[in-house]
Amino acid sequence: MPPFPARGARLNPSLTGCDVLVVGGGINGAGIARDLAGRGLKVVLCEKDDLAAHTSSSSTKLIHGGLRYLEYYEFSLVRKALGEREVLLRSAPHIMWPLRFVMPHDPGMRPAWMIRAGLFLYDHLARREVLPGSSSVDLRRHPAGVPLKPQFSRGFVYSDGWVDDARLVVLNAVDAAERGAQVLTGWRCVDAKRGDGRWDVELQDAAGRKQFVQARALVNAAGPWAAQFLQAHAHISGSKTLRLVKGSHIVVPKLFDHDHAYIFQNPDRRIIFAIPYERDFTLIGTTDVEHHGAVGQARIDDSEIAYLCEQASRYFAKPVVPADVVWSYAGVRPLLGDEHSDASAVTRDYQLDLEPGPAPLLTVWGGKITTFRKLAEEAADTLCRHMGVHAGPWTRGALLPGGDLSAWIGPPVRPDTDFTRFVQTVAVRHPALPPALRHRYARAYGARIDLVVRPEGLGEEVAPGVFEAELVYLHDHEWARTAEDVLWRRSKLGLHLSADDRARVTRWCEARWPAAAAASVSP
């Protein structure tokens, strides 16, 4: 794969005309670009910031059906999400894996019969081949009971999955690019007008440079900015109303040593998760708070930190306090507005709106990370049908970049054990790699690990565990342009490095990628 051109390079003139321009480099935009490119369409994906710079890197990082949505009778959404869990787990076993959840039973919350009934539905609404079903657990004898207060003696265990959300977005974009799409980060769509059977689109980068693209169809996958994009940039009035709900998370030093996660019921009838995170930490979230400020400026506030600490401390024997928080993040969920006053009750389902005509416009409203592939498939079906393109769905059994481990381990059996075998094979092939680094590379890059670990070596160690070879790979193949892209989205190395170490990575990136504010072009 060739390296990137210089920052700010002009678009390839042969690609300034395309079949579909996708606006938005979050999970939905990247997924739609990938699906369309795989059907043979000429696709351009533009993102004003970095891939997964906002909502799609600020999730609770779960592949889940949404157990709590059953209380709101969202059976269709839950069934759809449950059906996607194992499809996704098989597609990228390096960045997604099964996770068992423990729900301690609080008699003052939902009664045990209600929880058992909900878990029975959760087990049976969709077919399972990999994930085990639910069961009761005696927390006095189970490792998950050790860090909890002694009154929580009984609980329930069920299955869902974990995902590195930002890497999921990037891998969809990589797959789209390798199937012919052009991926542009740092380019904002500032104007889109319908012409004679086409969209005339103006893109602009942070330095004010402009590019012009003609597209047969336009996809608005701008997430929280979807309504704003339609009105301000695509000149479409009367669009739907999005309800913007902020979800915030905190990260604290690890609170337990086992590999299960917790789901805690709160007195306000919401739930929070406490999840093993990045080996040394516990991730706690999320909140549901109406967001009325600028979409890109969402930040956790003190009341949210206090809420998460308070609710976690209802269950853990050792209280969680704000001083424990080592990192936090917040994202804005673009939910379809409805009459519910409780933000947690607003549907997480999605809706696709097609404005037909010789130059169609497809807008994505809402959605959740677990259903992104299905959403992208439905979006591509809709556009292809309208544009007269005879190419059918293909992503259900397809693997994401790095997810095909067969050259290393032979035929796949099941995602979790396949990855374990893969790590063992990597250890044989790269015995000089320190075990922790070897495991991190295997998790991040899967079968593409040899694009990072090259025969010529890893190069300079810029910071502990951060080598030049990885930084070059992330720049040349994954659109990383700043230290933040590397430390907080392509990885979570920022959690493990000191401020001085992070500064060293920043200086290295600024010295070698000086035009970080300009545009980037896909490899």
Image: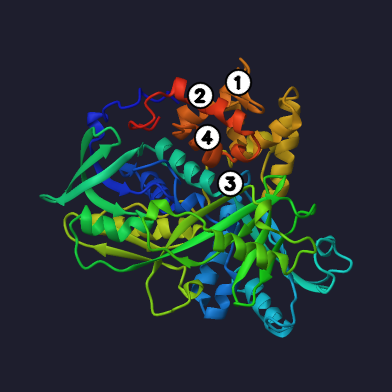
| Crowd rating for badge 2 (residues with CA inside 10 Å; few <14, some 14–19, many 20+) | some
Marks 2 and 1, the one that precedes in the sequence: 1
Q: Residue 507 has which mark?
A: 2
Q: Residue at x 66, y 68 (%)?
A: 311
Percent of width and height locating residue 475:
47, 28
Compute the Cα span from label 3 to label 1.
22 Å
**Residue at the spot of label 1:** 454
User: In the displayed structure, does residue 60 sit left or right of residue 178?
Assistant: right
Marks 2 and 4, the one that precedes in the sequence: 4
**Residue at the spot of label 4:** 486
Instruction: Please name which of the two marks, 2 or 1, marks the residue nearer to the observer.
Output: 2
Is 499 placed above or below 69 here? Answer: above
Dot 3: element = loop
Residue 457 lies in quadrant? top right
User: In the displayed structure, does residue 513 sit left or right of residue 270?
Assistant: left
**Residue at the spot of label 3:** 92
Residues tagged 2 and 1 counted as in contact (Cβ below 8 A): no
Marks 2 and 3, the one that precedes in the sequence: 3
Instruction: Please name which of the two marks, 1 or 4, marks the residue nearer to the observer.
Output: 4
Compute the Cα span from label 2 to label 1.
24 Å
Dot 1: element = loop
The quadrant of the rendering that contains the C terminus is top left
Marks 1 and 4, the one that precedes in the sequence: 1
Residues tagged 2 and 3 counted as in contact (Cβ below 8 A): no
Identity of the amino acid at label 4?
Val
Identity of the amino acid at label 3?
Ala
Asked whether residue 351 is in view, the answer is yes
Asked whether residue 42 is in view, the answer is no
Compute the Cα span from label 1 to label 4.
19 Å
The quadrant of the rendering that contains the N terminus is top left
